[in-house]
Amino acid sequence: MTITGKLEKDVSTLKKLLSAEDILTFDFTSDSGQAFTVVFADPITDKELLGEQVVRPLLSYDGKPTAEEVGKKLTSPERREEKDFQKLSEEVLAGNPVLFFEGMDEAIIVGTKKVFVRAVAEPSTDVAVKGPREGFIEDVKINTSLVRRRLKSKDLKIEFLNVGKRSNTFVAVCYLDGISVKKTVEEVKARLSEIDIDYIADSSYLTHFLASRPYSLLKQIGTTEKPDIFCAKIAEGRVGLLVDGSPIALTAPYLLVEDFQSSEDYFVPPYRATFTRILRILSLFVAIYLPAFYISAQLFKLQLFPVKLLLTIAGAIRDIPFSPSLEMLLVLFVLEVLNEASIRMPKYVGMALSVVGALVLGETAVSAGFVSTPAIIIIAFSGIGLYAVPNLIEVTSVLRLVMLLVAGSVGTYGILLVTAFVLLYLVTTENFGTPVLAPFSPLIRRDLRDSLIKYNLGSLDMRPKTLQSPNKRRLKQKGKQKETQND
Amino acid sequence: MKARKFLKTLPMKFYLLLLAVVLFSFFSNDFGLVDIQKTAVILAAGIDKTESGFSLTAQIAVPKGSDRSQGGTSSVDIQSEGETVSDCVSNIFSETGWVPKLVFINLIVIGEDAAKEDVVSYLNYFLRNEYMNDSCHLAVCEGTAHDLLSSKSATDDTSALAIQKLFSTAAEKSGKVMPNTLKDFAIGYYGVSKSSYLPYVRAKNQTGSTHGDAENTSGGGSGGGSGGSQGSSGSQTEQEKIYLAEETALFSEGKLVAVLPPEQTLAFSLLNGNVVSGTFNVKEKSGEAVTLTVIENGGGVKIDMKGAPRVKMKIDLTVRLCCRGTTAPIEDISTDDVKPELLDSAKEVLTGYVQALWQTGKESGCDLFHLQRDVYRSSLKKYKEWKDYLLDAAQPEIEASVRSLR
Amino acid sequence: MTKISSRQLYFFLACIAPVGKLVIMPSRLATYSGNDLLLPVLFNYLIETGMVFVVLLLAKQGKSFFSLLKEHIGKVGAAIVVLLFSAFLFYAAFLPLFEQKVFVQGVFYDTIPSLVAFAPFFPLAAYLCSKPLSSYGRTWDILGPVAIAGLAGILVLSVSEADFGALLPVGASGAKGIFGGTAHSLCWFFDSAFLLFLLGKIDYQKGMAWKGALFYGLGGLAAILYIAVFYGIFQETSINQLFAFAKTSKFFSGITVLGRVDFLFIYALAFVMIFYCTLPLQAGIDGILQVFGKKKYLPTILAVALNGILVLLMVFFDYRFGQIMHFVSEKVFWLFPVFTVLAPLLLLLLRRRKDESA
């Protein structure tokens, strides 16, 4: 359906499409008698701006009734012409008023959307002691501006797509032309355009549609709340997605090793970064395996304990009414409940909850003989270890539980079997043609420089081979005569 | 269509089934497993000969509960009899309900009488057992192993742990004790020499002991006796013991054939070249005793098969003066130099020890230095030629060199 | 899934293939050959290294085993040979699987657990077997370093305890002992037969044949070194020491202080063994798929059926490992050289003849 040029008919057509009560019309006439009508969504349109940039200039309008001429009179920098009613209705719903006037063949969309945004602040889930502290917010425009500020390159492409039949959510696809793999960009866009869903509440909705294994336990799309990380990933050759209404940006392809890296690793000396990365992976292994090994040692292989430790443990659990596996499951359950409750609780209750959790539940349960001290120590250590890699917490906490169940059933051998299963699963998982476990499997030696080991910046002169960027070099070494063709 | 749908949902059904099985086994949690609560953590085993077979004394660690303020390790001694060692172990299970686990055994003590028979006739139980720790120490004791293990140690709550201290690396380096493990004993037994050695442990009453309340006794009171057997009584009047392992029992074809006195044990250690900071006494011309400390020890035994077999036994020591048995002027105390006449005396003493050691080995038929094995490894022909009378025919050539540190 | 790269193949040949030979084989060799046990390993490795070279030469053409055979002996003949090879691999896999079972029961538990404890292996094996054989390549990228770390760790902890003099005098067991040991340990050397099924799945690089053989030989040297350490530690009692790589490191002096840290390395090798044991099964299934084509659910059905049969066999032979080993290594050991030596050689000869006639 397109515009007819008859003001009354066109306005009523649009009103029929947008029959909600908060869609209002405002009619006014210029000094020369030209009639105008603005259709807008009341709660999300900046009416002051509308009056200032649209109504006031047009009151003195006496030109031809063409969109081009009227447009010249408007003082709003954001405006465009549109004929299609479907698109016009989408713009009204997005907060941009539509201007009609008698005799015109196009309506004018004016960008006077009312923006409700919080300030750009440090993200709570991705804290860095050193380095930038900005975090994405819920507004996609501001988020793209944060990206643009960091990548002032003509190659930075930001393409907007609408996803969600009802929500019409803006999704910004960001990539560096000539650095990102075209095939990946096209594939991302294709997968996004195939999404047929009513409503996109958050960027996490998209991960399901972008993943090649949607039901996978493991993550398949990278996430970050920090523009610096987002831009660094785009500069490596990834494609980034910013979703309106979500402070969490997505990046693809995703490599498992990304979650062991922190932005801070690039702002501290490489030996420190290497140390902390190794520490992160060790803590993650300890967090997943420690409760399981503790249980399987108690039930099936006492030899895993040195004899003195064995006797200490045996003494501690002597009067516990539960089997060792059930005891551990119970403590883990309490930890997960405390964890879940402390995240959701109002902050002022949080402190009380910590006291209840740590003192009342822990101390009293031990002295009452419900659980043993070693079990609490093991789970506490495991709980802390898991947070060394916060981005993987959803996966790792489930894996810890699986390991615990298997360890309590068949012991250490079961743990090895589940590990073998996870390994095979990981090595066979690819996303956008990139193996999730790279650069370890397949082994890419050059990319190991920024994996668990972190070389200094001077050695990271090439983009990760794993990502297959057409432009391989990212750093020109001083004094190097030979340059690659891609420079 | 139905079949395709069924196949499509099959993996999910399979995972659910697997989850159900895992949950079931997790909560039922019994595939004949023996968890920590049902386990008898045997720290030491003592084997004695009885008229009908064997008697096994198992020293079982008992957890102290949450009260760790006392420290140490409590234990009970369970004695059990049977025709074989396996019988005895089974009896422990049937009579106490504890499942004996052998993985933590770090000491097997053989009673003197039992050692006079082929020890492998009962040690084979441990050698066969896949779950046995074959790096555990093996020792022979004076009297019965039961008496030794159930005695009250003056140095530890648990006698086995007190005895094991004698076999530490530090103790071995002192040259006072020659520890051996089950594995190495078996290698000696099954090797061409068919000989081995074990430390010989004696318990000695400790005088001047200051504690001895019933709570601290080994076993904390009792062991569940079996078929007339009993654990330590926990008697308040029981004398505390200290343990000595300065003697070494020699074995040939698995039987105890001789016991080396402390000085021969020292000579044996010195020949093995593993003594550091060990001491030995020599006499000055005046007859006063002087203690020398070994700083460096080189040593070795080699057999030369050119012509008649000759056994070259060499001890090469660097020593310093450690103590005199008399008062000494300050000038003497300020130096640890050993005078040449003392060094000569040391050589003489050591040569005597080694000579006596060789003689003991030869007379007992124990190929202590694995000479047959050395000949076997160097020449199969010579081995076949000499294997039956090598020890008798071999002539020892002893060379002791002792030098002062400065 | 992409093809198996040269690096991944070398990881398999040098690091993963030796692990399966370090469980029960060393003690069996000590039984047959005494202190000469290194010679049978050396002979078998020399033969098998040659066969690896031959098979990798065949890989140059980029054709599958079935396609290669089809060119020479026709479709029916090729199908029969490939199915025979698959059957052979199922047979050959049985002993390592049984080894794995007794190893698990012996090393992962303090007291003998019921068969149920080993049962979870089979669902995993079925899952592994249902995956394409080429998916193993990436697994080897991980397993290679794990195997190196495991074996190196165990060697470091063990070597000080070894008395290498125990390997003397050379030849003490006589020709019967040495050649008997060689013959009776053949059942642990069938890697070249397995490699035949990787034909067409390997991304062939120039010089891969000799490099592959070299890496296999290096793995053999590592195995020989370990077996030497093993015999140096246990000497005459080696016969009694099943599960070699789980036994040698416990004598390290630091163990008394730290506890059994060596289990980290033992478990690392046991982890590698899980995959190693399923390789011949997966190769056998791949052979059947080469003959009958890759129908949608066929790999899963075959994997489930095969592992179901294996479960039944394990239940039936539960405590009869000795008899199984006796049968495979002493009675029907001649089957191994037929498939691992003669067949690849014949294939190479046929290929040569075709080249000449062309």
Image (cartoon, grey):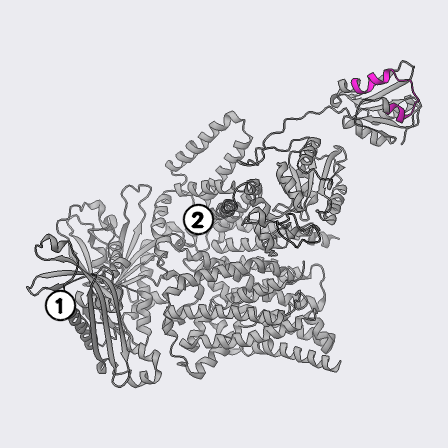
Residue at horizontal 89 percent and vertical 24 percent from the top:
A69
In the displayed structure, would residue B71 be above or below residue C130? above
Residue at horizontal 21 percent and vertical 51 percent from the top:
B155
Hey, which quadrant is residue B317 in on the image?
bottom left
In the displayed structure, would residue A31 be above or below residue B362? above
> How many other residues sit within 10 Å of disc 1, few (<14), some (14-19) or many (≥20)?
some
Which label belongs to residue A112?
Answer: none
Name the chain under label 1.
B
Identity of the residue furthest to the top in this view = A31
* Prevailing secondary structure class for the magenta stretch in the rendered image: helix
Bounds of the magenta segment: A52-71
Which label belongs to residue B345?
Answer: 1
In the rendered image, residue A182, in percent from the top left (x then y), is placed at 74, 48
- Quadrant (top left/top right/bottom left/bottom right) for the N terminus of chain A: top right
Identity of the residue furthest to the left in this view = B286
Secondary element type, mark 2: helix
Q: B103 left or right of C143?
A: left
Front residue of this view, candidates A316 and A430? A430
Hey, which quadrant is residue B105 in on the image?
bottom left
Mark 1 residue type: Ser
Q: A123 left or right of A12?
A: left
Q: Which numbered disc, 1 or 2, marks the residue closer to the eye?
A: 1
Name the chain under label 2.
A
Secondary element type, mark 1: helix
Front residue of this view, candidates B151 and A200? A200
Mark 2 residue type: Tyr
In the rendered image, residue B101, in percent from the top left (x then y), is placed at 36, 57
Residue at horizontal 65 percent and vertical 79 percent from the top:
C346
The residue under label 2 is A294
